[in-house]
Amino acid sequence: MSATQPRCLFPLANRPLLSYTLEFLASCEVKHVYVYCCHLAGQVKDYLSKSKWMKESSPCKVTPIVSADFTSLGDVMRDVDQKSLFESDFLVVPGDIVSNVQLKIPLEEHRIRREKDKNVPLMTLLMSKSSPKHRLRSQEDTVVIASDSITKRVLHYHKGCEQKKVMFPMSIFENPLHKVEIRYDLIDSGIWICAPQVPTLFTDNFDYQTQLDFVKGILINEEFLGNQIHMHVIDSQYCARVNNLHTFDVVSKNVVSRWTYPFVPDFCYDDLDSKSEGRYTLLRHNVYIHQDCSLEHDTVVRDNCIIGPKTRIGNRCQITNSVIGAGCKIADDCCIDNCYIWDNVEIGNCCTLNKSVICNNVHMLEKVTLEAHCALCEKVKIGPNCTLQRGTTIYLQMNNDEESIKKSFDVGEVGNEGQGYVWKTEDNDDINDLEQAFWGMSLQDYHNTVSESQIEEEESDADSDLLSDDEDDAENLELLTIDDDLTIFQREVKESLLGGFEEKIDCDNLILEINSSKYAYNMSVKDVVQTVMRASLEIADLRKTSDKDFFPCLKSILLYLTPLLCKYNKSSSSQLDYLYTLEEFASQHEQTANVMVKILMFLYENDVVCEEVILHWNSNPKGLAGDLFAQPIRKKV
């Protein structure tokens, strides 16, 4: 895919990745940005020349630097040193980052350390807090860091998960001044705050090619050189890199779900290309429709979708959880789910696309089916009447050798009228290895995905049977729809709270998302209050390692969610709903019942519920069907 288009220009939610990076830097009041370009540099330079970043009104000055000699970070830093671009502290930021982080605090921390000693503090690494099983993590992102918990000085840095064990030097534990903590809950954002001598160190050490080379070299030679590396942990804002198709998928969904606010699809970026004229309109269920697109009336677009400008979609199409770019033509009776369709793509009648990426100028003829994790590279033609198995990648650009130039199209894969070749690795043609290499997923993730797909199919079959049995009963069907909306709402809220707690997203953003779901599914305030409280308890129950660990875990969650809980506690009835939901959960979970006093005390001390409401709840056991569980719980209180 990157053979014909640089990765920094991949369209993420219909915006070039580089535009997110530049918007992030501009929001942090960066005044001058040097964009180093190597691979397909002409495309990057052309994009910049047509965007707002090269105009006088640009919020920051952008200078592209082009050279075919830049093959690594080390080459770039040595060029920075040769040109003497910086005389003071500066930032190093990858061109594929999406972030709404404000750098004021980490910059101030770095400045204070440098004021105390200009030579010792060399660099501050920005790390994103993320649980080990978070969706944004992949094999190449696995980082284990030993640091001083007080000074945030990095003592040991290990990247990769090839080994089951990580070896730490004993010296970091023997130093009585070190308060060592070992962390496996971090992702390296790729953002560095650098002292001006960093480029010189790259020049002096030509074996430094990557970030890992540099960090390890500094840590190994720390006593000799006297330099130190520190880190700052991002725990309440969004920061992620898009370095494979797995993270492309995850970050795209986060943008559509507005985790990256204000950098969301309906935000006006003011790029100068024709595709950006007009604005997106945000509809319910996170559906974004461009002003200049056309959808037939019997086509359904729902749940986390973007439809780009000048795109035309035919009759009876079903589009869910997908991003469709500019100038696309989609014919009739197509089903598109969890797909990313770039610009100027043509899709024929009766096509089914599932969890795949379709690049620019691809042409799909009628009755084409893409199974999960397929990728169609630029200008590929597929069909008609063919199915691509899971994990298949089709490309058109040829290698330079004469043998490949003479190679005929893989008609058995791409169809009788198709044009393209099946991508294979040199070492291994196993489909699992190919999928992992292209999507950046571990094999465990792959098997989990297969299992989830099977479960979804079984649930879908069960739902179909249920609807079929009740299709003549309008009243039952209406009740089923209401219950289904509530179930979906509860699941979305729980996912939002869990993701927010793990990434320490600002509660204001969670409130915005919950309110959006509330209006989308027509939920009452009571539904919201009950769902938020139950989700908090379920998350604590999920994260606890033992029954004794339940309350400390719940306390940390409730402490984080206190601003959100207080948002919905304005009336006495809402506060009572909190308590009755808590009581119902306690009747089903003994470890909750055992700590009811502590939970009530926490809610009272943090102004979530008032004393009068607690007394009213205690004397009115109405939250359960009867007094069977209510009285024992009140005795514990």
Image (cartoon, helix red, strand yellow):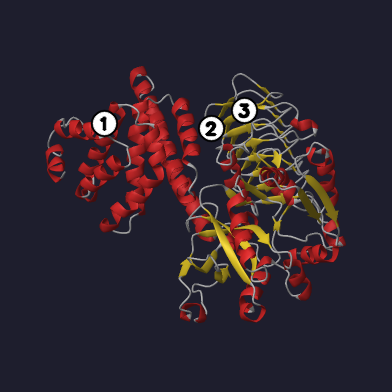
Q: CA distance from mark 1 to mark 2?
A: 33 Å
Local SS, label 1 = helix
* Residue 371 shows up from this direction: no
x and y, in percent, of residue 170 in the image: 49, 81
Badges 1 and 2: C-beta atoms under 8 Å apart? no
Q: Quadrant of residue 606?
A: top left
In this view, the residue in front, 232 or 73, is 232
Query: Looking at the picture, which amino acid does disc 1 mark?
Result: Leu
Q: Identify the mark nearer the N-term, 1 or 3.
A: 3
x and y, in percent, of residue 337 in the image: 57, 37
User: As drawn, is 285 to the left or to the right of 44?
Assistant: left
In this view, the residue in front, 378 or 629, is 629
In this view, the residue in front, 70 or 470, is 70
Q: CA distance from mark 1 to mark 3?
A: 49 Å
- Residue at image position (59%, 40%) is 255
Local SS, label 2 = loop
* Residue picked out by circle 3: 333
Nearer mark to the viewer, of 3 and 2: 2
- Location of the C terminus (image quadrant): top left
* Residue picked out by circle 2: 303
In this view, the residue in front, 425 or 68, is 68
Nearer mark to the viewer, of 1 and 3: 1
* Residue picked out by circle 1: 576
Q: Identify the mark nearer the N-term, 3 or 2.
A: 2
Q: Identify the mark nearer the N-term, 1 or 2.
A: 2
Q: CA distance from mark 3 to mark 2?
A: 19 Å
x and y, in percent, of residue 286 in the image: 55, 31
- Residue at image position (29%, 42%) is 605
User: As drawn, is 372 to the left or to the right of 363?
Assistant: left
Query: Looking at the picture, which amino acid does disc 2 mark?
Result: Asp
